[in-house]
Amino acid sequence: MNATITLPDPETMYQAIVDRDGEMEGLFLFAVKTTGIFCRPGCKSKAPKRENVEFFANADQARAAGYRPCKRCRPTELSGSVPAWLTQLVDAMDADPTRRWTNADLAAMGLSPVRVRRWFQQHYRMTFHAYLRTRRIGLAVDMLQRGSDVTSVALDSGYESLSGFRDSLRKWTGQSPTSIKQGEPILVERLLTPLGPMLAAASDAGLCLLEFADRKMLPEQFERISKLFQQPILPGTHPVLKRTAEQIEQYFAGERTEFTLPLRLDGTSFQQTVWKKLLEIPYGQTSSYGKMADELGKPTASRAVGRTNGDNRLAIVVPCHRVVRSDGHLCGYAGGLWRKRWLLEHERKHLSL
Ligand SMILES: [Zn+2]
């Protein structure tokens, strides 16, 4: 395998170290040649000189290069959780989910509104205020579906008037309170993995999205999914998401080689056939677009197979990372080539145990 690992570009990564930018958490680690220690991008230790810095995709690689983990930022532990500077706000949001936060409120907590906005944009792909709004809507939808009446839901979820609530609901979910009472929303939650945070979305019908949170296409994916399933997407939790989080954790620990989750593979019949074919590639093994096309009885369709592979919405669970070029080289992966390489190495390592 001689594919290069795709990390963010070195200047961006170095700037993140200098800025102690927690937003790059989970995307890379850096090591300092002069001290022999490796750190997370947000480490509070003195920023090293550029020429002494080496970048790694994960702790295994940094260790393999002879570096030791920093005792201060503990780079071998799972990253991507809510950073310390944000916990007070997140706790306050949990305590009173209907509260409307102004920039002055944030400043009073010692937080920079710009930084808060950036974090939410990075981790949820929406602005802080959009997050708060969808969260309030999420609460309202939950109450409606549990049988509460529209007026009390509107008031309990922080709306000043019934018409304001109806407008807001229609704007964010495309539905009226009555149709929401009957439908089910898709809930979206962050999962933490050694390869950075992922976003998972599910409804009672199953898991419909699992993507790395830094993926550029994510906003479009959200929109497509919302349209495809005719349901609003809201932050929240769901039993399917809990099971997904457990199984993904076991997968990364090398303890799980197959997933037992209800999956929503909605798409054209060709897409569904390709995605189901992907599910047949065993853990630790690879296939190619050409081979898949042959097996589907459509030897000329390898390009379409490749495209459909790229349209996979369920990373890791539907193992599109197990498709490589027929000469064995890695080829594109929506989550980044370095992740694809990491996943394949991870599987090979645990397969041989
Ligand atoms: Zn450190």
Image: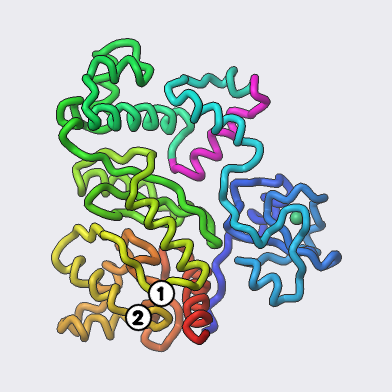
Image point (25%, 78%), residue name? 302
Q: Where is 243 relative to 320, above or below?
A: above
The image shows a total of numbered marks equal to 2
Q: Which residue is mark 2?
A: 282
Percent x, y of residue 295 = 21, 85
Image point 67% across, 50% down: which residue?
Answer: 16
In the structure shown, which secondary structural element does the residue marked by tag 2 occupy?
loop
Query: Which label is found at residue 257?
Result: 1
Mark 2 vs mark 1, CA separation in Å: 8 Å
Residue depicted at 24% across the width and 48% down the height: 204
User: Residue 113's image quarter?
Assistant: top right
Please name whichever residue, 347 or 55, is drawn nearer the observer in this view of the structure: 347
Mark identifier at residue 323: none
Q: Are marks 2 and 1 in contact (CB under 8 Å)?
A: yes
84 horizontally vs 284: left or right = right
**Left or right, residue 170 beside residue 52:** left
Q: Quadrant of ligand 1?
A: bottom right
Q: Say which residue appears at 71% left-offset and 45% top-offset.
A: 19
Q: Nearer the viewer, residue 139 or 344?
A: 139
Amino acid at dot 2: Pro
Q: Is residue 338 above or below residue 10?
A: below
Dot 1: element: loop
- Which residues are drawn in magenta? 108-125
The picture places residue 130, in percent across and down from the top left corner, at: 41, 31
Is 285 on the left-hand or right-hand side of 4? left
